[in-house]
Image: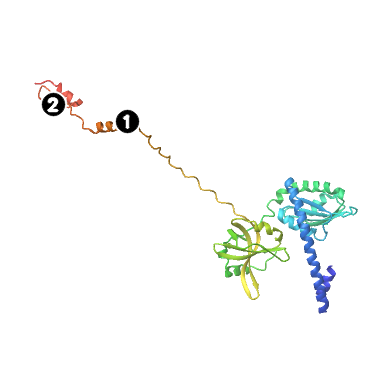
Amino acid sequence: QAELAVELLATDDPDRAEELAGFVDELNTSRQALERSVLLAARKQAKQQIAAGDQPALVLAERDWHPGVIGIVAGKLAEQYGRPVVLVSQDKLGVKPGVGSGRSVPGFNLADAFTRCTQHLQSHGGHAAAAGLRIEDGSLDAFRAAFYAHARTQQEAMRGGTALEIDAEAPLVTLTHQAVTEIERLAPFGCGNRRPVLCTSGVRLASRPKPMGGGRHLSVEVEQHGVRLRAVAFGAGDREQELADARGPLSIAFKPVINTFRGWARVELHLEDWRADKPAAPPAPTQQPPKQQPPPQQTPGEQRDAARRTDTASQPATPEPHATGPGGEQAVGGAAHAKDLTAPTR
């Protein structure tokens, strides 16, 4: 319905503009519902393929997928799983060729990959990041095998291509209105000048995540060291339960922004991703001294014998008699005195 959108922008008739705006909004709401439905079904297939083996790419197909949203869904899955994704909407009757749309990741040329698998396709076209194709149902398995084989040869180039680049670590307490305003001075943001991505850890949810934007986005309050901020996760409506089930502190990646609404300006976070913090290692066990065993119990007879031995040991020793030598000197039993006793008299 592109012509209706053009007419909406070009018409000078307010009534016609209002009529077209309402109709286009209804179309957009319907598209969003179709998109969510296809996304849930495609993600289920993706999880099954990944569980069966760590595939370097994903080729997913179904008969009731609307061809108008498969490209959007392929892009979301490529971003989530960090690998090229192709979705094929097969003909319900199996008579016409299926229509496919793919999205890539940095380091993988999707158009070139389709060219290398051209023997399995009726037609294809596109560029490195996004491409489309037409394929017969009977060629789907052969195309999937050939596409995966080529993707394996490109894994080194793809590695790290979808990693989230973080510019700095910043606790929530540092995100004052003045600090975020200074970040805004780096604008305009875009492809060649992306908005800075920050991170912090030890963050807890201060409220349950709430869907917004027709269920496409999430809003949640986060707290760290007494500082509480609102955070919005765009396009993460399908991860509501995952975030709600988070236990313990989280590490979050986010873009700080100034949100102005009804005359009020406040700092908010645009959540990029999150994960549970790793638990701290338990402290090393301390060495406990061995417990002393109590002395064995003595019988009354043994106690009397022990008392007698103690009394005997405490009595003073009887002095030995001194030996008298020829000269009248006394020997005290030491080796030095033995020499005196045997010394000749003059």
**Numbered disc 1: secondary structure:** helix
Amino acid type of disc 2? Answer: Gln
Tag 2 residue: 330
Q: Position of residue 325 (x, y in %)?
A: 12, 23
Q: State the residue at coordinates (73%, 48%).
A: 50
Q: In the drawing, does residue 283 fall left or right of residue 80?
A: left
Q: In the drawing, does residue 196 fall left or right of residue 122?
A: left
Q: State the residue at coordinates (80%, 46%).
A: 145
Residue 22 higher or lower than 341, as above or below:
below
Amino acid type of disc 1? Answer: Gly
Label 2 CA crowd tier, 10 Å (few <14, some 14–19, many 20+): some
Q: CA distance from mark 1 to mark 2?
A: 46 Å
Give whichever of 111, 95 is nearer the camera: 95
Q: Position of residue 330 (x, y in %)?
A: 13, 26
Q: Residue furthest left?
A: 346
Residue 150 higher or lower than 17, as above or below:
above
Instruction: Kindly tell me whether residue 129 is visible in this rendering.
Output: no
**Numbered disc 2: secondary structure:** strand
Q: Position of residue 217 (x, y in %)?
A: 70, 63
